[in-house]
Image (cartoon, coloured by chain):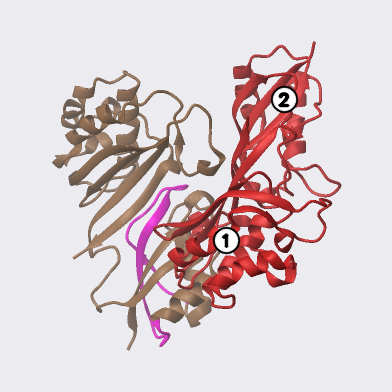
Chain colours: A brown, B red
Amino acid sequence: MERNIRLDITYIGSAYCGWQSQRNGTTVQETLAAAIGKLTGAYPKLHGCGRTDSGVHAKNYVCSFTTPSKASPETFVRGLNALLPRDIAVKAAAEAEPDFHARFSVTGKRYEYYILNSPVRDPFWEGRALHYPYPLDEGLLDEAAKAFLGERDFSAFCSAGGSVKDKVRTVTEASVRRDGDLVVFSVAGNGFLYNMVRIMVGTLLEIAQGKIAPGALPGIIASGDRNAAGATAKPQGLYLSEVYYD
Amino acid sequence: MERNIRLDITYIGSAYCGWQSQRNGTTVQETLAAAIGKLTGAYPKLHGCGRTDSGVHAKNYVCSFTTPSKASPETFVRGLNALLPRDIAVKAAAEAEPDFHARFSVTGKRYEYYILNSPVRDPFWEGRALHYPYPLDEGLLDEAAKAFLGERDFSAFCSAGGSVKDKVRTVTEASVRRDGDLVVFSVAGNGFLYNMVRIMVGTLLEIAQGKIAPGALPGIIASGDRNAAGATAKPQGLYLSEVYYD
């Protein structure tokens, strides 16, 4: 009988066209599937916990596949880490219940968006944070971000191109904190629309710039109008941080 | 009259053969000098605060040069950051006293060495820390490291190839601390010999492995014998953190 294997991985997205395999450009999915194929002798159908955009990173990403391989979880971790490029690593492997599916079993996710708020750029954050050299009041943004909390139709925070019809999502956490020069937007919820977190960040940055009033967020959400929200923030600051399962 | 300009810079050393210009391979010095040349129209004689090995990083590095340019410090910062590759940045520029010299005026330096102590590798620390997957008792190493403190002949902690005769240096700080999976060796002193910090780290790691007794360090220092100390730890974990001037 085939075993159902869950992998917890992490990757720097800079060199990849996101998770999902596609016609043009290398993806994390095909890179990992190729390594699994080499290790087990059978190229797997690899289910990811969701798509990530080109250039977006993952501190934690979960995927699953079935395999005839009898390799131990430790062998998967060691073998795959030896085969994978240095910007992708397997943190843990485990035999999952037969009905576990990395995408369909997800109950929630947490994202973080890193903003480097310093007068000059920092090589150590290059490609890993958005550089924002102007003053940023994280207290103001933290307060504004509370408008995202709860069950809402997030149509105003969804880019065109997504195939999802139901745009109601529940956000359980939305905060902005500062750690030195790094300002971090953290948001958790039961699901996220196409570019949703990046549009949230772009909107918060327009609040910081005074282009949008701090109290305007509830109205923007209620409008359901993508044009009422801010620009889509660049991908390099975005990290998938946690994936939740029951 | 020529002005004396001090630059405080930071760089990721992975792509460079250290600071100092040499026959083969790109260096930070020549990369920065070329940018200054472009900005001011005159290729400068650029004095650095010291050499750094190939692959070693700098959170803070200080250099100085004289120039006929009338550009403001802000222009140096902005102009050079626009011209430099993304792995080097100028943090600050200032007009210095005529007798300030980035190398001869140094009174001390602080280095940090990052060890990623986790069972599997982490893409986000790739090339930026030494991956050490075995147990590491940072308390034991912190205690052992105190043997480095004081004015000592550090011949046992100097690689062959250096031209310096006097190997007496004063170490004012030597500690090992843990921050999650990251174990950091921090050492400050009035000067450092060729590979000195990397040999200190290699020796501490052999203490962690039980190859060298924790109490053996004073004897190793006293021996003056390079072969009594541990291996030279890899460059990618080493950061020049602070450069001190009076």
Q: Residue at x 49, y 54 (%)?
A: B124
Amino acid, disc 1 = Ala
Asked if disc 2 and disc 1 are in contact, CB closer than 8 Å, the reply is no
Chain bearing tag 2 is B
What SS does tag 1 mark?
helix
Amino acid, disc 2 = Phe
Residue B100: mark: 2
Residue A47 in magenta stretch: yes
Q: What span is colored magenta in the figure?
A: A43-72
Residue A30 appearing in the image: no
Chain bearing tag 1 is B
Left or right of A128, for residue A46 = left
Question: For mark 1, what is the residue?
Answer: B147
Q: Residue at x 68, y 56 (%)?
A: B196
Chain-order first, disc 2 or disc 1 = 2
In front: A188, or B52?
B52
What SS does tag 2 mark?
loop
Residue B155: percent from left, percent from top: 74, 60
In front: B82, or B59?
B59
Please, is residue A162 above or below residue A27 in the view?
above
